[in-house]
Amino acid sequence: QHILAYGEGNERRLTGRHETASMASFSYGVANRGASVRIGRQVEEEGCGYFEDRRPASNMDPYVVTGMIVRTTLLD
């Protein structure tokens, strides 16, 4: 569901090469620039903070993507 709303051209960009995660699988990691979702080192140390979803393309609708992330992480 998410990847469909994350902009056009992700099949060319999210290949799993060149510091991108493959769009075929989800991954996360601390300070891992090759993961789908990157968690900062300071977040791990302090136990709170933000995460970076590295999958949305620059041509995505930020309101749609933010809404999906909020529903998935906070409301579901």
Image (spheres, rainbow, N blue to C red):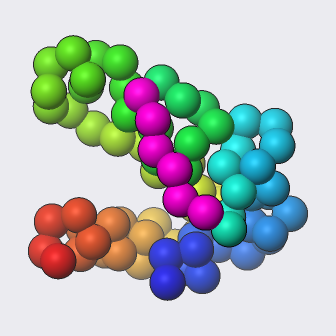
Q: State the residue in front, 60 or 55.
A: 55
The residue depicted at 80 percent of the width and 56 percent of the height is 15
Instruction: State the image coordinates of residue 45 (x, y, percent, origin top left).
Output: 21, 15
| Residue 63 seen in the current view | no
The residue depicted at 23 percent of the width and 75 percent of the height is 71
Q: Which residues are magenta?
A: 25-30
The answer to whether 20 is drawn above or below residue 65 in the figure is above
Residue 9 is left or right of residue 62, and the answer is right
The residue depicted at 28 percent of the width and 17 percent of the height is 42
The residue depicted at 27 percent of the width and 72 percent of the height is 72
Instruction: State the image coordinates of residue 56 (x, y, percent, origin top left).
Output: 58, 60
The image quadrant of residue 29 is: top left
Residue 5 is left or right of residue 70, and the answer is right
Magenta-drawn stretch contains 68: no
Residue 69 is left or right of residue 26, and the answer is left
Instruction: State the image coordinates of residue 63 (x, y, percent, origin top left).
Output: 39, 72
Q: State the residue in front, 51 or 25.
A: 25
Q: How many marks?
A: 0
Magenta-drawn stretch contains 28: yes
| Residue 67 seen in the current view | yes
The image quadrant of residue 52 is: top left
